[in-house]
Image (spheres, helix red, strand yellow):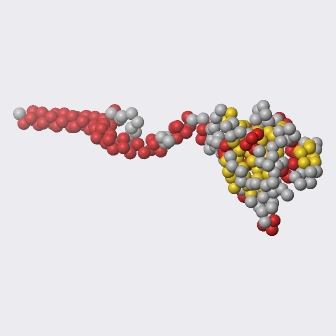
Amino acid sequence: MITVKKILGHSALAALMLVLAACNSASEAEPEATLAPGQTQGSPSPSASASAAPSASVSAAPSASASAPASAAPASSEPAESQVPQATDAPEEGMPPTAKEAASTVLRALSRGDMETLASWAHPDKGVRFSPYAYVDTATDLVFTRDQLKGLMKDSKPYVWREFAGSGEVIKLTFAEYFKRFVYDADFMNKAKTALNKGLGQGTTLNNINEVYPKDSYDFVEYHIAGVDPSAEGMDWRSLRLVFEKMGEDRALVGIVHDQWTP
């Protein structure tokens, strides 16, 4: 009986050791069999991964936003030109422009000798009339169309522009010469006072601008410099009047009237 019990004892012990060995083998194989997608060998077990999920999602958010910033998406989907700032040299007048805004743009063009811009403002049918003095002579003042204005600065042909005040001598000059003498002959851009539909300079020459260009259909902007040389005591004042016809809500340049002190 003792021998049988010993045999049975050894058998039970062997069976127990086999069970323990099987359990150890199963526990060692378990991580490899239960790896979650994206896990590598040595990652936490499924139960550990489940408990760590919230913290993992929080830590993943910054890296996701860093790799694809939210602000980058719209920029890549918009046309490139929408990101380019407007040209700083764009016209300053409104849409439609006021008389002063239109005059400011035209005066800037005159200060630069920019005939292309000047031509773009010229009346499409009436062109632009040039008067060397305050009196606008509709019979003899020269008028130029848009197309003519573009090339006038390079035109070598002398034109007759009425007569000099005081002497009565014929004013015969190329456009470039006339421009320097009877258009932009002072720094109107930086030194002039400005007025709308009001004369600032008054000489001995009759000013008939409101008769030729009635206020109900026209506006004029005057640029006036009280004196160029202080020693002249005001006898060298200058005025430049830019006349615009009202065309609906828009405006077109019809006259450039120069004025100055006359004997």
Observer able to see residue 112: no
Q: Foreground residue, 53 or 173?
A: 173
For the C terminus, give its image quadrant. bottom right
Between 155 and 128, the one lying in front of the other is: 128
Place of residue 230 in the rendered image (x, y in percent of width and height, measured from the top left): 78, 66
Front-lying residue, 21 or 3: 21
Task: Name the image quarter holding residue 125.
Answer: top right
Q: Quadrant of residue 43?
A: top left
Where on the picture, by quarter, is residue 200?
bottom right
Q: Quadrant of the N terminus?
A: top left
Residue 52 in percent (x, y) is at 31, 42
Q: Is residue 137 left or right of residue 214?
A: right
Q: Position of residue 170 (x, y in %)?
A: 93, 48
Labels in figure, total: 0
User: Which residue is at 76% across, 54% downward?
Assistant: 202
* Residue 201 located left or right of residue 92: right
- Residue 234 vertical position relative to residue 63 in the rendered view, above or below: below
At 79% from the left edge and 36% from the top edge, which residue is drawn? Answer: 127
Answer whether residue 128 is visible to the viewer in this image: yes
Q: Name the residue located 78 percent from the left edge and 63 percent from the top edge.
A: 234
Residue 142 in the image: x percent, y percent? 86, 40
Query: Could you tell me which residue is drawn at 45 percent across and 41 percent down?
Result: 64
Compared across the picture, whether 39 is left or right of 108 comes to: left
Q: Residue furthest bottom?
A: 231
